[in-house]
Amino acid sequence: MNGDPTERLREIIGESRRIVFFGGAGVSTSSGIPDFRSETGLYTGEFEGLSPEMILSRTFFHLQPERFFAFYRKYMLYPDAQPNAAHRFLYELERQDRLRGIVTQNIDGLHRTAGNIRVYELHGNVHENECMECGASYPMEAILRTEGIPRCECGGVIKPQVVLYGEPLPKYVCIGARREIANADTLIVAGTSLSVEPAASFIGDFRGKHLIVINREPTPADEQAELVIRADVAEVLSFGGRS
């Protein structure tokens, strides 16, 4: 085996034909979006005595919607963020028809912005918002340009189509994601601590040849992985899909 882990990664990608990428917040940090569970992540702090998990819960949304949206606008929306080298690399792999799917825990929508189509957004997308009364659709800008509780023309509350704590993951997105993982010959797990269930358990469906982990911190999948790279995801994947 080649001694350079990035070169070995390139070799594996070059011989793979059904790659699936399972990513988390670490994929987008190079785009200026902070992660959650690192030493400096969002979830290490408290906000008016409340944890982010409490604020981003279905219960808090219904009981304290104004406080929910104040937090959501300030810490969850990054309208100026652009795809980084990792996103562009994955677009190139899909264009070559070797990437069968991106399974992402991120809600920033950057994989779709980069051009990827085969994206399974387990926790939804900040760009999709819907009136809870009439079902009208609104872009992210509808949340950003308002104060307090954003409302539809009909008077209903506009709810972000992101999965809050206490809400189930979207059924058919999960079915598709698990199917692609089960059929992959290579699974790249990147930028995630694999600490959020049930999404983290999806990698247990993988039966392929190469399991690769790219993450700054240890993960539960490290022992099973053929290759573990402790580095920033965008830096590792900056070779731009050339193999």
Image (cartoon, rainbow, N blue to C red):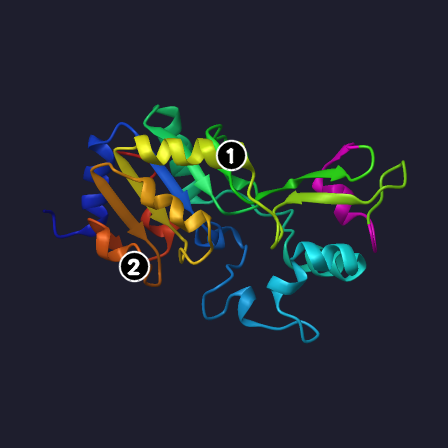
In percent of width and height, residue 22 lies at 39, 43
Q: Which mark is residue 173?
A: 1
Judging from the image, what secondary structure is the residue with disc 1 in?
helix
Q: Is residue 118 left or right of residue 238?
A: right
Q: Nearer the viewer, mark 2 or mark 1?
A: 1
Which amino acid, by three-letter code, is at mark 2? Arg
- Magenta-drawn stretch contains 136: yes
Which amino acid, by three-letter code, is at mark 1? Val
Q: Nearer the viewer, residue 113 or 134?
A: 134
Judging from the image, what secondary structure is the residue with disc 2 in?
loop
In percent of width and height, residue 53 lies at 60, 62
In percent of width and height, residue 219 lies at 33, 59
Task: Write the residue at 85% across / 39% down.
Answer: 152
Task: Write the residue at 90% across / 41% down.
Answer: 155
Above-or-below relation of 235 to 99 = below
Q: Nearer the viewer, residue 171 or 181?
A: 171
Residue labelled with disc 2: 230
Distance CA(mark 2)–CA(mark 1)? 29 Å
The answer to the question of whether label 2 and label 1 lie on touching residues, with beta carbons closer than 8 A, is: no
Q: Is residue 102 left or right of residue 156?
A: left
Q: Residue furthest left?
A: 1
Task: Write the residue at 54% across / 55% down.
Answer: 32
- Magenta-drawn stretch contains 241: no
Q: Nearer the viewer, residue 50 or 217?
A: 50
Would you call the spot at circle 1 few (<14 residues within 10 Å), some (14-19), or many (20 or more)?
some
Would you call the spot at circle 2 few (<14 residues within 10 Å), some (14-19), or many (20 or more)?
some
Residue 239 makes an appearance in the image: no
The magenta span reads 135-149
In percent of width and height, residue 49 lies at 67, 76
Task: Write the residue at 40% across / 53% down.
Answer: 191
Q: Is residue 20 left or right of residue 149?
A: left
